[in-house]
Amino acid sequence: MAREITLSVDAMGGDSAPAIVMDGISEAHVRYPGVRYLVHGRSEAIQPFLDGNPALKDCCEVRHSDDVITGEQKVSQAIRQGRKSSMWNAIDAVKTGDADGVVSAGNTGALMAMAKLSMRTLPGIDRPAICSLFPNEVGETTMLDLGANAQCDVRNLVEFAVMGASFIRAISGIEMPRVGLLNIGSEDLKGTPLLRDAAAILRDADLAMDFVGFIEGDDITLGTVDVVVTDGFTGNVALKTAEGTAKLYTQFLRSAFKSSWMAKLGYLLIKPVLGKVMTRLDPRRYNGALFVGLNGVAVKSHGGTDALGFANAIGVAVDMVKRDLNSGIGEQLTHLNFDAVESIQAAKTA
């Protein structure tokens, strides 16, 4: 690695913390031996994992925090009462410059709110968004927003397109990512005025993307575009529907292969091929949602993941720090005519 990267980790966030967090760091240390970790949480719970692993102990610094943000806490309560929590301290380490990025499997709403308060947004960005990857027929698609902003305006969608294109460019090297606005049809006249206005601005802007216009839900997995742009309400529904469908089909397969001795024999015959399919669809491979648009790197791991999934979330943070995602976003924002955005907004409210 060109330089040493330090990540700040909330060790107390997630369903099985701190075990999955520390095991995830151990897994990530094999992949990224040059990364160091500031581990925030209750030291008495964290230290045993380091005592039994000299390599892990060498790359980790424990910073004690008494308080823990639970998954059930309301965002307002977490903000008021969580200033001494492991989550807040992990985020604050990025603000103070002690770390290059933060990773947590804790409460999503609290993490986003705290990160926005501490790091602020990038200049020119109105709202941050949650961005992650989906498997598709030919590779991977990134989608945003996945739940940070239930309601969006024209400017938000345009900014999401810029941020999503910069994200996929950073992780894949695609110079001109294909970007589409999620809609109920691909025709120009389909959808709400909000979507049509955002599309008009993206078509006219001189941006490092191939804006293809409107796409539909099935385009997400077809791989029609590299970046899917939508509001947080729709994006979160799509995400949870995809996760639920994957679990449903997995359960169908398990039940079918247990239904008879011939089915069990068939399973043994196709097990190697089925294993490749399941690996390709393994949600742990895509774990690690980036809070894109913040003035810093913040990655949210799924709370119910395991060590492999958490290690992949760490990998997202490492990639974003190494490839300086935020500089790419800032450069692209200079090509946007936000006067046109403001004119459209003003006309709507006149």
Image (spheres, grey):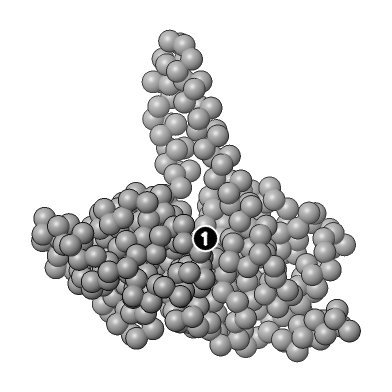
Q: Is residue 76 above or below residue 226?
A: below
Residue drawn 63% across the image and 63% down it? 232
Residue drawn 31% across the image and 55% down it? 17
Asked if residue 112 can be seen in this view, the reply is: no
Left or right placement of residue 281 versus residue 153 in this view: left
Task: Compare residues 48 and 281 and report the one nearer the observer.
Answer: 48
Left or right placement of residue 258 versus residue 221 in this view: left
User: Image quarter for residue 175?
Assistant: bottom right
Name the residue that disc number 1 marks: 132
Left or right placement of residue 128 versus residue 323 in this view: right
In what quadrant of the picture does the C terminus appear?
A: bottom right
Left or right placement of residue 5 versus residue 324 in this view: left
In what quadrant of the picture does the N terminus appear?
A: bottom left
Residue 200, percent across and down? 80, 74
Residue drawn 24% across the image and 61% down it? 29
Label 1 element class: strand
Q: What is the three-letter code of the residue carrying label 1?
A: Ser
Q: In this view, does 264 lie above or below 93?
A: above
Asked if residue 349 can be seen in this view, the reply is: yes
Residue 194, percent across and down? 79, 70
